Amino acid sequence: MNSRRLDVLAAGMLVILLLTSLHMISAAVQRSEELGRWFIPLLLFTVVGLVLLFVLVGWNLWQLLRDYRRRVAGSRLSARLSVLFLVLALVPVSVVYFYSTRFLSSGIDSWFDLQVDSAMEDALMLSKASLDLHKRERLKLSESMLDSIEDTSQTAIALAANELRSSSGASEITLFSLQGSVLALSNANPDVLLPTPPESGTVQQVVAGDNYVGMTTAQDGRLLVRCLVLDKRQRGIILQALYPVPQSLGDLSQKVQRAYELYRTRAYMRSQIKFSFALSLALVLMLSVFAAAWAAVYTARRLVQPISDIAEATRAVAEGDYDKQLPTPRVEDELGFLVSSFNAMTRRIAGARNALEDSRRALQNQHNYLETVLGGLSTGVMALDAESRVTTANRAADQILGMAMDELQGQPLSALGEHHESLRPFVDWIVDGLARHAREGRAEITLYRGGGRQILLCRHSPLEAEKGIATGSLLVFDDVTELVRAQRDAAWGEVARRLAHEIKNPLTPIQLSAERLRHKYLGKMAPEDGRVLDRATHTIVQQVEAMKAMVNDFSDYAKPSKLQLEPLRVDDFLSEVAELYEGGSQQLVMQLDAPGLTVEADPVRLRQVLHNLLKNALEAGGENGRILVNSRAGEEENNIFVEIAVSDNGPGFDPELIAQVFEPYVTSKTKGTGLGLAIVKRIVAEHGGVVHAENLPEGGGRVVLRLPAMAQTVGAAVKAGG
Amino acid sequence: MSRITSIIAVVALLVLSPALFADEVEFRRVGLTLSEGGLILLDADISYELNATVAEALENGVPLTFETHLQMRRADAWIWESDIVDRRLRTVLLYRPLSGMYELRNLQGDEHLSFATRAAALRTLGKIVAMPVIERSSLNVDEDYLVRLDVSLDIESLPLPMRPGAYLDRDWWVSSEPWEWRLRP
């Protein structure tokens, strides 16, 4: 059983109990003797019950007010309906109460009329007068009876008493002495042995000479006339006689007395009677009002409940709770239909929402898939909207452009060019292409970045949401710097190999022929011609030697590697190579800081690398050159490497060429093949290392190469290093 | 006889200090005596004085019921122990307009007494003579007993319309201070 039904049951029981109690009070007021004793307890019970009902009503009204203030759904309608019901109930009840009290009051007043008052008084007076007449007669009779007693002896008095009683019709005659002792008693009932005692005071009155006559009531309720008379003959005797009032007179008098008493008592209680009726009516009124108030609030709430539920549920639906279902009312009315329709509507909305959620999830999965694919690409991908604002860029785009593209999201692409000057050619090409409304474009763009030259292979194409309607552009770009470089290196290798093959072969016959010419004809010729021949052949041989050296260089560059790898202690190896350069005019400083660290390398090739670097440094430094060779151990991403740097105090690298110094035929020197650093790079690459050139802030250039250290030496190296 | 003396010595005949009791009903004298037959008897002289409200109701024919309540219980009795003696004397005082007399009706014995004056009726109402309380033999001589006497006007016996008003009106709360004493038989 739910709490609401329990409330109704409790309130109903209370009202029924109160009605029963009021009915019993009404019965008690109507002089029901057995209920009279319960009047006050019933009254108290009713008052307590009404207080309870009042509390119940107050609680309900307070709840209604609280809901109204909190703007709970349906509370306003409930409040309006409650007030309406209450007014509808209160007005008739109040009218009935008002007129009932008025009719009651005037009705009770009409019982007590002045004429009736006076008639009652008159009737009583008449009865009294009639009785007084009777009393006087009896007094006279008593006086004459006492006077008639002649003999006052004990026996004679007793006899006289009996005689007088029977002759006078008295019920009792008693003779007293003045001191109060009984002289004689005669009673109609022979069993009565004691006289009815005279009231205190009356005897004194009689002794004082004033005979007494009065009314008294017998044990059976009959009226009696009591007379006390003093003996006129001064014999010291008092006679008390009790006469029954004649039946007719007695009955009439009793009737008059009862009616008078009743009227008098009622007249006296007039205000109390009015109060009792008014109280009963007020209790009925309060019961009606409280019950009506409670019923009004309850009915209003009950009526409004489905509407409140719908309002509440509508709010919930508006807030996104589409699973809201309302309890269907048991009564199949318009409200029930409304609730059923609402439930059907929310079910359909929930279904649509679920379908939408599913498709959204599928879309999200697709998005995640695409993002993963894009993230995994080494190609940079960037999407622009119709206003050329960056909307999406993958990780590869960040890496290729060397910046976080997320920061540019939502900004026009031109901002990229403004913030990063080196990217301007890239940005300009795209912006131009889009400005020309070119549907697609492809280009190779070279950028000059801090790390050197960067070649990007770019392509842009429109993004189409629907066929023919472009909503933006898609940019795809690859960093092909390494690819281009590798292609160039391969081409140079091929050139070198062909040169070596095609040029080196005829050089030896040329040289031999020139030497043979000189040998054969120098002695036979005139001195003047001999000098010419000597100089010419010498030049030929010298130039052929030079060409041979050049071709050997090319050969070395083009020769496929056949490395004879062995462990080399880097510091020892560097010291050994440096010894060859000691004693020159230039200063060679060694700073070796990789003790015990070993690399796996071909000593011949590595020595060639060092020779090339030292030779370049010596040439750059000139006569007063100062060359610094240092080594150190380093760690990057858990890999230990050895770094060897050769620095000079010469003019440094040409800033424009610094990115290309390791390419063949890139040189700032007047002599040389331009292959020295290209060979260095090739050998270092063959050993799994990297090399780069840089200019020192204080002037001079430096070439740094890194070679991977052997695993077993790593611990020692790190320990030694630091 | 010595026993009687002892009872009288315990109970005594006390003249009560008026300050201790309500003005309208006072115990002037209360006493317990032992009859020759071994019966403990109560004698009391109670003074009644009616205030104007009550007197007016009496003069207008409203019967007044006075109740004299006598209780006796063991001095160290538990609260739920029933009284050894629990006796109520109910007497109605009413005015007869025809005869101009005041009437006393003893509701137990159905006795009628008429009085020419209200004072005489109230005097008689206040006289309790040799009212049997209990057989002495039924009491434990080693035990103390508490005897309690109080007198009041019974509002519940008033005509019904008057009751709610009487309950709310102090004039109708006519009663004596309870008279209590300890008795060792």
Image (cartoon, coloured by chain):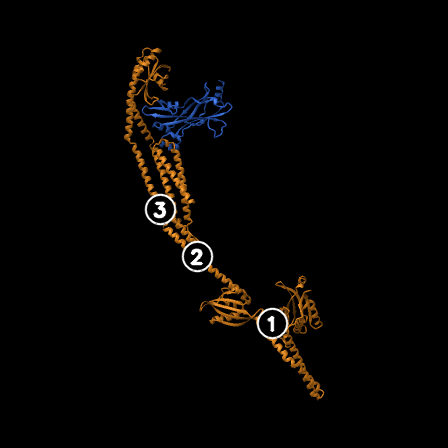
In the image, the chain rendered in orange is: A
Q: CA distance from mark 3 to mark 2?
A: 42 Å
Label 1 sits on a secondary structure element that is helix
- Three-letter code, disc 2: Gly
Q: Is residue A610 above or below residue A42?
A: below
| Mark 3 / mark 1, whichever is N-terminal | 3
In the image, the chain rendered in blue is: B
Q: For mark 1, what is the residue? A: A658
Q: Residues at marks 3 and 1, common chain?
A: yes
The answer to whether residue A348 is visible is yes
Q: CA distance from mark 1 to mark 2?
A: 67 Å
- Residue A369 location in percent, x, y? 51, 63
Label 3 sits on a secondary structure element that is helix
Return the residue nearer the eye: A603 or B148. Answer: A603
Q: Is residue A340 above or below residue A640?
A: above
- Three-letter code, disc 3: Leu
Q: For mark 3, what is the residue? A: A84
Q: Residues at marks 1 and 2, common chain?
A: yes
- Callout 3 environment at 10 Å: few (<14), some (14 to 19), or many (20+)? some
- Residue A149 location in percent, x, y? 31, 12
Quadrant for residue A690, please give it: bottom right
In this rendering, the count of numbered labels is: 3
Give the quarter of the figure containing the N terminus of chain A.
top left
Q: For mark 2, what is the residue? A: A351
Q: Nearer the viewer, mark 3 or mark 1?
A: 3
Label 2 sits on a secondary structure element that is helix
Q: CA distance from mark 3 to mark 1?
A: 97 Å
- Residue A222 location in percent, x, y? 32, 22
| Mark 1 / mark 2, whichever is N-terminal | 2
